[in-house]
Structure formats: structure tokens, C-alpha cells
Amino acid sequence: MAVMAWMTRGRAGVAALLVLVALLAACMEGGPQGQRSVQVTQAWSRAIPPNAPVAAGFMTLRNAGRDDDRLVAVRSASAARVEIHEIRHEHGVARMRELAGGLPLPAGATVELAPGGYHLMFIDPGEGFVAGARVAATLVFERAGEREVVFEVRAIGATRGAQAGDGEHHQGH
């Protein structure tokens, strides 16, 4: 009888352990492991003149995960708000618009935010957008969660960002 009770408890313990492992694996997809699935490199911005109403941010995003993801929001203490924008050329005219649904990041794809294309728009920026400065922001991804990133501020006329690997700020990831 004691052996039978032990076998029943043993099976229940194994089943509980398997459930716990499955739950932990599911949580990891949106947690630290999911955060590593999106790589952020070359985060940079241009310096702006005093009292400029906006500043732009650029970077390269690589979704190394197996699932599609999306950059859904950006926050920064260096601006009143941050919007995700694109520039489209329609009938020879460049038109800028906010991507209300966020920026899609297909699995395995690299998406570049660069002048003339996708970019971040720092609305009502503070005084931190001067050449040589660094501006912190939090990227919010649909699946990968939040990422802290530091944008290096380049000269006003800069057309390229930092070297690969620059700009990403690791904070326990």
C-alpha cells in the first residue's frame, strides 16, 4: 500500500514538474529569451538646433527569433513623446506618416531605420540632442518585451550612424 501511494505521488510530482517546465519555457519566449530575439545595433540620432520641434532616431533591428514581432512603442525621457514613422515616395513626393500599428519585424529579417525611410520621431525633444551626447530610450516590442537603447547623437548633417554593435545598452539581458 505504501509503495502504491509513493508511485502515485511520484507520478504526480513528475507531472507537476513537467507542467512547471512547460510554463517556464512559455514565459521565456516573451521574457529574457524573447528579448534576445530582437537585436538592436547602430542606434543614432542627429544633433538639432536649439528649440527644434523634433529630432529623428535611426537604428538597425534584427529579428533573430522564429516568430514575427513588431516595434509597437518607444519612450524616452528626452522627448515629450516618440513616434514610429515612415517616409513613402508617392508620385515623386516624399510623405511622412506615423505607423499607428507599429513597425513589423518579420522572423529572420533585418529592418533598418535610416534617413529617408523608417525612423523614430522624438517630439518636443529636450536639450540632449547635441553632437557627442547620448539619448536613452525604451523600445517596446509586441513579443520581445522592452529594450533599453542608447542613441549616439551625431553632427547635424550626419548621414550614417555608429558602428555595428554601438548604441545597444544591455541591462540584465
Image (cartoon, rainbow, N blue to C red):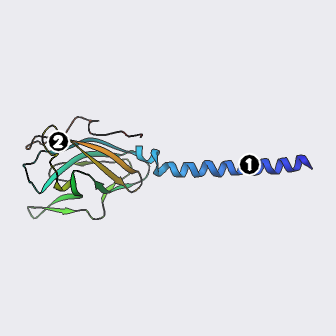
Name the amino acid type tagged 2. Answer: Val
Residue 149 x %, y %: 30, 44
Q: Is residue 29 visible?
A: yes
Q: Which quarter of the picture shows residue 133? A: top left
Name the amino acid type tagged 1. Answer: Gly
According to the image, label 1 marks what residue?
13
Say how many tags the image has.
Answer: 2
Q: Residue at 15% of width from left, 46% of height from top?
A: 129
Q: Residue at 33% of width from left, 45% of height from top?
A: 148
Residue 170, compared with residue 17, is above or below; it is above
Q: For mark 1, does the 10 Å Cα neighbourhood hold few (<14), some (14 to 19), or many (20 or more) residues?
A: few
Q: For mark 2, does the 10 Å Cα neighbourhood hold few (<14), some (14 to 19), or many (20 or more) residues?
A: many
Q: Secondary structure at mark 1?
A: helix
Q: Residue at 9% of width from left, 54% of height from top?
A: 52
Front residue of this view, candidates 8 and 164: 8
Residue 159 x %, y %: 12, 43
Q: Earlier in the sequence, mark 1 or mark 2?
A: 1
Whether residue 142 sits left or right of residue 76 in the image: it is right
Front residue of this view, candidates 109 and 15: 15
Residue 143 x %, y %: 42, 54
Residue 170 x %, y %: 36, 39
According to the image, label 2 marks what residue?
153
Residue 141, compared with residue 168, is above or below; it is below
Q: Residue at 55% of width from left, 48% of height from top?
A: 25
Whether residue 141 sits left or right of residue 155 in the image: it is right
Separation of marks 1 and 2 at Cα, in angstroms:
55 Å
Q: Residue furthest right?
A: 1
